[in-house]
Image (cartoon, coloured by chain):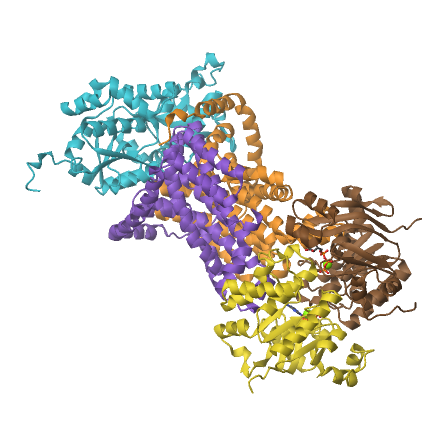
Chain colours: A cyan, B brown, C yellow, D orange, E purple
Amino acid sequence: LAGLPMAAQASYCGDGNTLTFAGIGWESGDFITKVMETIFAKGYDCKTDTITGNSITLENAVATNDVQIFAEEWIGRSDIWNKAESEGKVQAIGDTFAGASEGWFVPTYVVKGDEARGIKPVAPDLKSVDQLKDPAIVSLFSDPEEPSKGRFLNCPSGWTCEGVSTAKLEGYGLGDSYTNFRPGTGTALDAAISSAYKQGQPILFYYWSPTAIMGKYALTQLEEPAYSDACWANLTDPAAKHEAACAFPSVKVAYGVNSEFAKAAPEIIEVLAKATFPLDQVNASLAYMVDNEVDAAKAAEVFLKEKADIWGAWVSPEAKDKISASLN
Amino acid sequence: MSMSGIQIRGVSKIFGAGADKAIALVEQGLSKAEILEKTGCGVGLRNITLDIPAGEIFVIMGLSGSGKSTLVRHLNRLIEPSAGEIFFDNTNVLTLGRKELRAFRTNRISMVFQSFALAPHKTVLQNVIYGQISRGTARKQAEAIGMEWIAKVGLSGYEHRYPDQLSGGMKQRVGLARALAADTDVILMDEAFSALDPLIRSDMQDQLLQLQRDLAKTIVFITHDLDEALRIGSRIAILKDGELVQVGTPNDILANPANDYVARFVQGRTAVHA
Amino acid sequence: MSMSGIQIRGVSKIFGAGADKAIALVEQGLSKAEILEKTGCGVGLRNITLDIPAGEIFVIMGLSGSGKSTLVRHLNRLIEPSAGEIFFDNTNVLTLGRKELRAFRTNRISMVFQSFALAPHKTVLQNVIYGQISRGTARKQAEAIGMEWIAKVGLSGYEHRYPDQLSGGMKQRVGLARALAADTDVILMDEAFSALDPLIRSDMQDQLLQLQRDLAKTIVFITHDLDEALRIGSRIAILKDGELVQVGTPNDILANPANDYVARFVQGRTAVHA
Amino acid sequence: MFPESLNFSIRKPINHFVDMLVTNYGSTFRAISDAILQVLLLIEGVLRGTPWWVVIIAFMVLAWLGTRRVVLTIGVGIMLLVVGMLGLWDQTMQTLALMTMATLISVVIGIPLGILAAKFRSVQRIILPVLDVMQTMPSFVYLIPALMLFGLGKVPAVLATIIYAVPPLIRLTDLGIRQVDHEVVEASTAFGGSPMRILFGTELPLAMPTIMAGLNQTIMMALSMVVVASMIGARGLGETVLNGIQTLDVGKGLEAGIGIVILAIVLDRITQGFGKPRRFK
Amino acid sequence: MFPESLNFSIRKPINHFVDMLVTNYGSTFRAISDAILQVLLLIEGVLRGTPWWVVIIAFMVLAWLGTRRVVLTIGVGIMLLVVGMLGLWDQTMQTLALMTMATLISVVIGIPLGILAAKFRSVQRIILPVLDVMQTMPSFVYLIPALMLFGLGKVPAVLATIIYAVPPLIRLTDLGIRQVDHEVVEASTAFGGSPMRILFGTELPLAMPTIMAGLNQTIMMALSMVVVASMIGARGLGETVLNGIQTLDVGKGLEAGIGIVILAIVLDRITQGFGKPRRFK
Ligand SMILES: Nc1ncnc2c1ncn2[C@@H]1O[C@H](COP(=O)(O)OP(=O)(O)OP(=O)(O)O)[C@@H](O)[C@H]1O
Ligand SMILES: Nc1ncnc2c1ncn2[C@@H]1O[C@H](COP(=O)(O)OP(=O)(O)OP(=O)(O)O)[C@@H](O)[C@H]1O
Ligand SMILES: [Mg+2]
Ligand SMILES: [Mg+2]
């Protein structure tokens, strides 16, 4: 090794390692992963790979260094991640995008109606969470399995947001009038929302943005009391009694990486630290996928071709040239 | 006439695929062995025409594999003929619809199988009353009839045993009781006594004769035992390689065997009460 | 002496659970029917002691259900006795280990089953050569032996057929050929001719006699046909309800039946070449 | 690699078809769904409303009636007690309601179809590839449209469970009947047994061991769907498993998994007991 | 409700045990995993490296040799062509490699175990509850520790597939051998057939229809695990299904689902063909 002329180029990729991404299934994660993969493959001559899986297995794989980068990690949302982070096995780098938010939603036609589809507003005054107690509103969201109650579609079981929303339901005093319906998977939640939306029916659910659902459908977030640290501490403590609740804090979405990898590949970490997608850009790309019925790879290609001004700032000039060249 | 018995008219049966080709060869007069070699088809019966009068014990004899079982299976249509017709009291059995066929089988004809064919999951009694139950007899009554026949074939004490707990001859007697308990006009008996010892056998022969005399049942009886045939048969038919070689009263056959084959079959016996 | 035959010593067999209790009742001398009623156990054999000399055709007769099949199945240990011992050339068959037992079965003893027990997935030829192949004979050679026996039982042309394409008597002959092709010292024949017509049957009897004369085979033969027993048997044993009633040469038995039962069995026959 | 020029896709028409269905016929399907739901809720209500010890005793009585085996009866009692002690009683009753319903419907559908397949070669020819699809098409592919049409929760869960679990019962009923000794059936025919009597008196009893192997597989496969059922919002043990998995809490998942296994064993042993002929008990 | 005072939990000890395993024995398990992986990669390499038309012809030849049925042989060709035309060739070959491996290992494990269970009542008594656990314990419960030990990807996928798919083969081999006509076996015994000859010459051939029903179920269940396999990182058709599901793209999921069904049908028909006795072809 000593004989090699100044192995200054000694880098993670240069040493022949494969840079493995988590193959995230949802649209934005898929899109971002495709963009970053192309950047490292073309700009930094990395051997790249993507491994599919559901998010638990993939997060776990980051902890074991089977996967190096989880491109859209909603920090604090998954117990697996929290545990691995506290053990120092993984860390969050940069911000994948800023301004992600979460909350409780209803379709906008519930409040405003939708003339084009002939839907009348059924709850024109509905604005905030505290109105949900109103029996008229409860009966709007009636649960077929327990018709006397309304149905609140929570986050899938096991996600951190599920615990928080459960605590909120109690905190807002809605526990007796709504069933806390946990759909089991993100897919089930999405299917329920999109089915209700297509049929113009009222539905009350937890959701987050940026997402394809959020891009596709007109949704209205219900107002909640302002966020406070004390309130949040109470909501996230499963043992506590919840008497009041408040809004979600703004969410940090970052690149989740393996800690050993982070040590071994500072040049990659440097790029990740800078690579923040503007929120409207993510939304635009998601809309592009929906409108044109194309997959994330195509959207990533279009983004890289057309928005060099955005991603150009994340990489070194040589890398930028190489990437641009590869696109043509 | 009210009881006209069974008429078999030109019945042939070919086993195996390509029966058409084989039946043409049968008409050309090729032998069973030749046809087997040429087409792979087995000739079961060839052009059998035969009258079985009502109220008689009609015995069928012949070499092993000569088509005896095949012939009697045609009578209750367990086998469909490749050619020919079968009349039963002047109705063509082959044209019976599903329902008529079932009624025919429950009320008119029953059978003792060469291989017993008992239901392994049913007790002796349940096996024996099968025919009666099929016909709609109330279970109580059917069981009384069944117990009677079980006693007559010497199986009292075994009515709640299962077939796999019986000896070969006992199984055969269950099959026998099953056919007799069905109380039909016609009973087909395919080597029904072959597994019985001489004592029980002669007892059974007596019962059969009595049944025929008292109730005028028509019994088609396959046997290999010439003594038995002579003792109980009103008439004897002899088959060879699927062909009918001779049919007549026992004395006819003993006195005037149609050919050498029949002569060898009845060798050493002379006509009685001739 | 080199060929000492088979000795059966005090063998009893009880079928069903609770054999111990039943065997006590057997010793108290209760009847088969009583024991069946009391314990639900079937008495197969009770305290049989019998010598079967080597090189003879030994016939076993008796009522249906009297224990004949059960007795011969003890000889090749398809059934284990509830009590008693069996010696074969002075070795106790019941003490043979797995391997010895297998060697004993391949080389010394073969069997014709009352219910044929052919392998349905094997052709006639494959069934017939089973014993030879078990013994390790090369397939070519085994097939030659098999074809020879198939011809001898009159089934040439059927060697590549499957059992379900054969008539009852033909199946029985396959079973016969299988036992004979195994070429063992002892052959157990459980009603081996019961489904055969008189012509083939007498032919088979001749072959059996010849086999015994030429090769000094020991043949244990169960039959219900007294003529047959008298014709081929060197010695006849008569069973009743699992008990041995009489054993002796045909003439002995005809001349001095041990009791009324035996007398009825041999009724109407007189001793020949006395 | 396969040449791209030959490619075609059914993706868009399928998606548009699903959209159309959901948009236009959603309410019809909801009505159907609600009807099924009422039955389910009834069973569940009974099971959850009954005190735990009554349920355990009831199952022990069933086990005894089915098998007449003391050890097994006590075993059933202990296993159900374990479920309760693991703190899973309520979830277990929810899952049990779902599985009982799915198994019952599977039997009602599966055995007759198996019989038809055994009797008519044409039915068999049509049914076999359908069963292949039912067993191997990933359930979410049809669950998504089902979710959209029937709503989240128990109804699509029962449907998916039946679709996945019924094929082995159909297949083995078919096989069992075809394997019945031809001679015995022939004898029944010769004595004028009606097709129904032959079927119920001869063929089904003789095919019973094979049919019961099919029912065993149906129960096993139904219980292997418990987690999928929870993925679409059916409550019960599956939800606990899912929660355990998603929080990497293997112990929690295992506890609920044990609950599922116990349910499977209890349901299986009892049904097998009832399926065994009296003679061999 | 079940009284809480009776509760106990095995959750913590299990979790600690898993932690301990991962921490202390992780590298050992990785080594095992790598060995299995090599074999898998070999099969996959061959399948993916061969031109598509060669693969299709090879399968058609196999189908012909197995079944001697023209329609079926052509059907196999057309179905594989459809997979290619749906643009799923490469994924299909990846899945095929995984499934071939899993099925082969299942046969190698399943038939001998089934035979042992049929021969020895004690083996059967031990094996049956284990099979119940294998079929109904939700796979993720054991997959999570497996993932931690073996790493992501094909190896745990093959393991999970085998665990889930092998039980019906064991069960039906057992049942099939027990159902063989006692008299025929007795005759073979009387002629001195060795246990091996009786097994291979008499029992297995006569049990074949039932065993093949088991193999059919094993193949069906293996292919029903394709999506789970992809959830833990195995490539192939499951990946496409998963992606389709997560984006509510029913059409995409359905296309890949059809690919899975086709694989199931092709594998099943070919193996069934080879399992049928020559007499009935
Ligand atoms: N497996 C069994 N289980 C119970 N009882 C049996 C069994 N096998 C035979 N038996 C009984 O043992 C007795 C003798 O049977 P065996 O088969 O030896 O009679 P057999 O003399 O050969 O009669 P056959 O001439 O009718 O063949 C019979 O009463 C029968 O019921
Ligand atoms: N299912 C079948 N398939 C093919 N051939 C058959 C079939 N059944 C019978 N045969 C053939 O038909 C012929 C007549 O058989 P059948 O059973 O009628 O003879 P049988 O006279 O009853 O003989 P046995 O006295 O031996 O019972 C035989 O050559 C037999 O091989
Ligand atoms: Mg016959
Ligand atoms: Mg006998």
In the displayed structure, A233 sits above or below A308; it is below
Where is residue C184 shown, x and y percent of the image?
A: 57, 73
* Front residue (pair A120, C102): C102
Q: Quadrant of residue B143?
A: bottom right
In the displayed structure, B39 sits above or below C174; it is above
Judged left or right of residue C85, residue C57 is right
- Image quadrant where one finds the C terminus of chain B: bottom right
For residue A185, say whether it is visible. Answer: no
Where is residue D243 shown, x and y percent of the image?
A: 38, 41
Q: Quadrant of ligand 1?
A: bottom right
Q: Quadrant of residue E184?
A: bottom right
For residue E214, say whether it is visible. Answer: yes
Judged left or right of residue B90, residue C136 is left
Q: Residue at x 74, y 72 (%)?
A: C224
Where is residue D216 shown, x and y percent of the image?
A: 53, 50
Q: Residue at x 84, y 47 (%)?
A: B87
Judged left or right of residue D11, residue B211 is right
